[in-house]
């Protein structure tokens, strides 16, 4: 069976969704599928050490989608590129008798339209860019209706199943898969105990909340380390400001293996992202027995339910929870142990890919021998 995975590729555009597609493409290839990864917004792919074939697509539009489908001739399209061109992608697949699986990695993908928020302090240029973005989002909201042409819809957060239109009968929770690998040559840069924050630096991740937290914690003997590539121009000035507290360290972008090294040595992780799908960085932390303190989002309510850390809900609670974990080693150890116990097996690449394989089998109407193809 030939599977076409559509998303940006992590070798050119690294993010959580791209990382997940890379893991799934590798695992599906291991199961015996022929996998072609369509790397959107790419003219070429630097990496050549993948198990699967990669094709570059410089610009995503209805004509290029049709040409790509005709060239690759997939049995199933696995679409994990948000709602961008979703309607023509699903409609073209329907016309060409190709099965179409829409994989939802963020709650926004289940909404017809969502305004990009304006924040006080943004300059005139940034404000106009936000206005233009919202007008563009409104025009492109029609792509949402591509979900109704999907043969199946997957989510990585079970709370979102109820948001899928009732007419979609094949719906499945396919959890994110996070293999833990380290860079054995990477030397940890912070030299004293540190709290870690990891994400691409943009509005949705609220990095300013972590910097503000660090400023409130200057009375502790703990560093506050931020990792991630700047993707919002307004944050360049913030990170270079002279007002940055002395206990704050910005390490810039790091490879995923280096991030795992940093998680392994931190005392715990702070998460300030707005509600999304199911953040990879939370899973990476739990698999390494590190508790997490989340400001705005507790996916499926598991942080509170299983005591994997704290769900702070507001900045006052965030400061209180962080202080508690800094001073209480026993609590950190207990929550870290809970986190590892919860994460083991739930986010295993092999288990989750086999579940996706069974979904492919059900919509394509054939039997896939998982044992003989391994």
Image (cartoon, grey):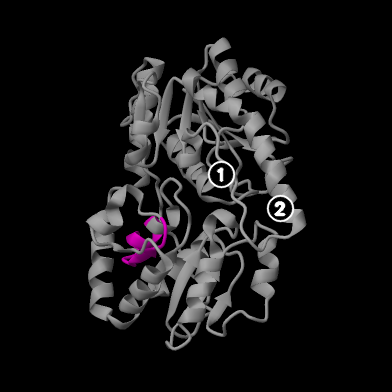
User: The magenta stretch spans which residues?
Assistant: 283-296
Q: Is residue 183 above or below residue 23?
A: below
Q: Nearer the viewer, residue 46 or 320?
A: 320
Give the percent coordinates (x, y) of residue 288: 34, 64
Name which residue lies at 64% across and 17% down: 70
User: Which quadrant is home to the C terminus?
Assistant: top left
Determine if residue 184 is in view.
Answer: yes
Determine if residue 26 is in view.
Answer: no
Q: Is residue 141 above or below residue 27?
A: above
Q: Is residue 48 above or below residue 319?
A: above
Helix, strand or loop status at disc 2: helix
Q: Which residue is mark 2?
A: 127
Give the percent coordinates (x, y) of residue 175: 36, 42
Q: Which mark is residue 90?
A: none
- Report the label total: 2
Q: Nearer the viewer, residue 102 or 146?
A: 146
Magenta span has 14?
no
Q: Which residue is mark 1?
A: 50
Q: Local crowd at mark 2 within 10 Å, few (<14), some, or many (≥20)?
A: some
65 displayed left or right of 260: right
72 displayed left or right of 311: right
Helix, strand or loop status at disc 1: loop
Which corner quadrant of the image does residue 120 belong to? bottom right
Name the residue at the right extreme. 125
């Amino acid at each position: 069976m030939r599977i076409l995975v559509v998303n940006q590729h992590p070798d050119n555009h690294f993010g959580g969704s791209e990382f997940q597609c890379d893991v799934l493409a590798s695992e599906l290839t291991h199961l015996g599928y022929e996998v072609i990864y369509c790397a959107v917004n790419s003219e070429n792919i630097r990496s050549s050490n993948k198990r699967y074939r990669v094709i570059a697509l410089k610009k995503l539009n209805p004509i290029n989608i049709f040409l790509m489908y005709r060239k690759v001739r997939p049995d199933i399209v696995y679409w994990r590129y948000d709602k961008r061109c979703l309607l023509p992608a699903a409609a073209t697949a329907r016309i060409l008798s190709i099965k179409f699986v829409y994989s939802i990695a963020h709650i926004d993908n289940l909404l017809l339209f969502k305004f990009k928020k304006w924040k006080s302090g943004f300059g005139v240029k940034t404000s106009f860019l936000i206005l233009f973005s919202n007008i563009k989002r409104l025009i492109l909201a029609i792509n949402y209706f591509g979900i109704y042409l999907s043969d199946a819809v997957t989510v990585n957060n079970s709370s979102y199943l109820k948001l899928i239109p009732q007419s979609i009968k094949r719906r499945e929770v396919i959890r994110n898969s996070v293999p833990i690998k380290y860079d054995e040559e990477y030397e940890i840069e912070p030299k004293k105990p540190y709290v870690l924050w990891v994400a691409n630096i943009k509005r949705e991740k609220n990095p300013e909340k972590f910097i503000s937290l660090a400023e409130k914690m200057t009375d502790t003997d703990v560093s506050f380390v931020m990792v991630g590539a700047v993707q919002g121009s307004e944050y360049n000035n913030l990170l270079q400001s002279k007002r940055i507290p002395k206990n704050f360290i910005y390490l810039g972008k790091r490879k995923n293996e280096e991030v795992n090294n940093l998680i392994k040595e931190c005392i715990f992780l702070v998460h300030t992202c707005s509600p999304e799908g199911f953040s990879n960085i939370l899973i990476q932390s739990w698999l390494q027995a590190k508790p997490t303190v989340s400001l705005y989002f507790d996916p499926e309510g598991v942080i509170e339910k299983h005591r994997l850390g704290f769900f702070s809900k507001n900045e006052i609670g965030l400061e209180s929870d962080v202080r508690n974990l800094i001073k209480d080693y026993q609590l950190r150890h207990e929550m870290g142990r809970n986190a590892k116990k919860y994460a083991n097996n739930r986010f295993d690449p092999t288990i989750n890919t086999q579940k996706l394989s069974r979904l492919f089998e059900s919509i394509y109407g054939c039997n896939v021998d998982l044992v003989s193809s391994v």
